[in-house]
Amino acid sequence: MLRTNQSFLDRTITLYAQQQRQEDIVVRKYTKGQNLYDQGTASTKVMVISEGIAKCYFTEANDKEYIVEFLSVGEIVGEIESIRHIPSLCSIQAMTDVTVYAFSKTYFRELLERDITWSNMLLDVMAQRIVHTSSRASYQQLYSLEHSLHRLLEIQSQQDIAIKKEDMAAYLGISVRSLNRELKKFLE
């Protein structure tokens, strides 16, 4: 549920310390509720989260949100858009105060071409996302909403994070009303 990648963050910190031009990677801070990316707009940076929690979500044509993932330490965002030269596929919003390492797109592309360690780590990140997305989709198809909610509440408790009802519903792909009905069953 909460995606992290400490080894990717460690590599980013090393690159930050070694950079020749101080504008290749800069540290940016976002406050709770602020968007790092807006769906459909051009992004100027690729970011790696160093502190905090953000949600990655799509807003559908009917204005409903669907949360794809909760992201934290070491997760990279904006890389697909940079590689494919496309606008942001989704919005990324800070759920807590968030600090990121923001790579210029030019430097990010240079790293892909000349730093095999970076490229391999990025390939691993993308492969992990495919596996995670596939298993989450099959899980949601095979198990009941009650079971999925129970698992979400369990993970939330284990990771000691608080998620608003609206975000829980968006993550489960249901309405807040349906979520409230399911939560009421848990309390009975």
Image (tube, rainbow, N blue to C red):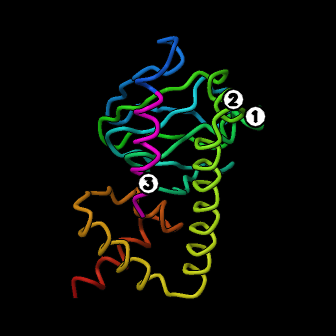
Magenta segment: does it hold 149? no
Rendering coords of residue 175 (x, y %) = 48, 65
Q: Is mark 2 on a helix, strand or loop?
A: helix
- Asked if the residue under mark 1 is in contact with the one under mark 2, i.e. CB atoms within 8 Å, the reply is no
Task: Check disc 1: other Cα within 10 Å, few if <14, some if 14-19, many if 20+.
Answer: some
Q: Is mark 1 on a helix, strand or loop?
A: loop
Q: In which quarter of the image is residue 142?
A: bottom right
Whole-angstrom CA distance, mark 3 to mark 1, is: 22 Å
**In this view, 4 is above or below 86:** below
Residue at point 68%, 35% (across, down): 112
Q: What residue type is labelled 3?
A: Phe
Q: What residue type is labelled 2?
A: Arg
Circle 2 sits on which residue? 109
Task: Check disc 2: other Cα within 10 Å, few if <14, some if 14-19, many if 20+.
Answer: some
- Asked if the residue under mark 1 is in contact with the one under mark 3, i.e. CB atoms within 8 Å, the reply is no
**In this view, 174 is above or below 81:** below
Q: What residue type is labelled 1?
A: Ile
Q: What stretch is highlighted in magenta?
A: 1-15
**In this view, 12 is above or below 188:** above
Whole-angstrom CA distance, mark 2 to mark 1, is: 14 Å
Magenta segment: does it hold 2? yes
Q: In which quarter of the image is residue 166?
A: bottom left
Q: Is mark 3 on a helix, strand or loop?
A: strand
Whole-angstrom CA distance, mark 3 to mark 2, is: 26 Å
Q: Could you say which disc has been placed on residue 70 in the image? A: 3
Residue at point 42%, 39% (across, down): 49
Q: Main secondary structure of the magenta part?
A: helix
Image side of residue 40 versus residue 55, left or right: right
Q: In which quarter of the image is residue 173?
A: bottom right
Circle 1 sits on which residue? 86
Image side of residue 187 versus residue 50, left or right: left
Residue at point 41%, 54% (across, down): 4
